[in-house]
Amino acid sequence: MSALAGGALIGAAAVMLLALNGRIAGISGIVKGLLPPEGATDAAWRICFVVGMVVAPWLVGSVTGEIAVPAVPGNGLWMAVAGVVVGVGTALGGGCTSGHGVCGMARLSGRSIVATLTFMATGVITVFVVRHLLGWGS
Amino acid sequence: MMRALAGLLAGLVFGLGLVISGMSNPAKVLNFLDITGTWDPSLIFVMGGALVVTFIGFRLVLGMSGPVLDTQFHLPTRSDLDMPLVAGAALFGIGWGIGGYCPGPAVTSATLGGWPTLAFLGGMIAGMIAVRILQPRSLSPATIVR
C-alpha cells in the first residue's frame, strides 16, 4: 500500500514538473544538467529540485517521529564503484529509473522501454551474481 | 524564480514518494532485484503507481499549449535505438545491482546515508562528468524543445 502511494507521489511530481516547467523528471538528467549548468535560470530549478528531494526524508521524519536511515550493502569503496558505474551508465544511456522507467515509459518511448527492460535485467543478474554466485554482501 | 519554486515543490513531492514507498532504501531495492533469493516484489507497485499517474497526467499536460512557467516543453525527440543507449542502460543496471541506489534514492539519502552514500554520489557525479568530457556532443541524447 505504501509502495503504491509512494509511487503515485513520484508520478505526481513528474506530472507537476512537466506541467509547470515543461521538464522531464529524470533525476540523472537533472543532476547531469548541473555538470556544468547552461545558465543561472536553468541551474536554479535543478538545484531547488535536488534540495526538495534532500529535505523530503526529514519532513517525513518530523511527521512520523522517526527517520528511516538507508541501509547500504557495502563500504565507501564498494559504493563509490557502484556510483561510478551508475553515473557512466545513466549519462551514456540518457536516463535512469525515473527518466526512462517512469517518464519515458509513460510517453511510450521505444528508447525508454528498451532501456528499462535492459537495466532491470542487468540489475537482477548483478544481484544474482553478487549474492548467490559470489556470496557477497547482504 | 517561479520555475525554481516549482522545482523545489516537485523535488519535495518526488522525494516524499521515494521515502514513503521504501525505494530510498538500498536494502529494499536489492531484495526487489533478488528474484531467486529474498525477493520483495513490493517495489513493482512503486513503478506501477508512478506509471498510472504519469500515463494519464502526461497526456493531459501535453494537450496544453505549453507549460505554465516556460514557453515550450523540453522533451527527448530521439527514437532510434543505438549502442550508447543499450550499453549505458546495461551499465546502469549493474551499478544499481551493486549499490542498491539509482540516482533518485541516492540524492534523497544524501544527508542520511553517511559516507558510503556520499561516496556513491561522488562516484556518480564523476562518472557523469567523465562521459560528458569523453563523449562527442553529437552522440549525447538530444533534447529538442517542442
Image (spheres, helix red, strand yellow):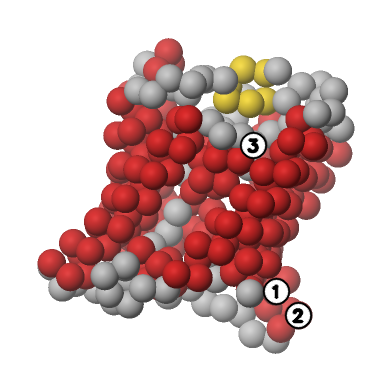
Residue at image location 57% in from the left, 78% down from the top: A68
Give residue A66's position: percent from left, percent from top. Answer: 64, 85
Residue at the extreme top: B138
Amino acid carrying label 3: it is: Ile
Q: Position of residue B21 (x, y in %)?
A: 59, 69
| Picture disc at residue B73 | none
Q: Are marks 2 and 1 in contact (CB under 8 Å)?
A: yes
Circles 1 and 3 on the same chain:
yes
Chain that bears disc 2: A
Q: Chain of mark 3?
A: A
Q: Nearer the viewer, mark 1 or mark 3?
A: 3
Q: Is residue B143 left or right of residue B5?
A: left
In the rendered image, the vertical position of residue B17 relative to residue A119, given as above or below: below
Residue designated by label 3: A24
> Could you tell me which secondary element the residue under label 2 belongs to?
helix
Q: CA distance from mark 2 to mark 1?
A: 5 Å
- Which residue is farthest bottom? A65
Q: Tell me where residue B17 appears, x and y as whole percent.
A: 65, 62
Do the dots labelled 3 and 2 sit on one chain? yes
Image quarter in which the N terminus of chain A is found:
bottom right
Residue visible at 30% across and 25% down in the picture: B83
Kind of residue sitting beneath label 2: Val
Determine the CA span between mark 3 and mark 2: 29 Å
For mark 2, what is the residue?
A63
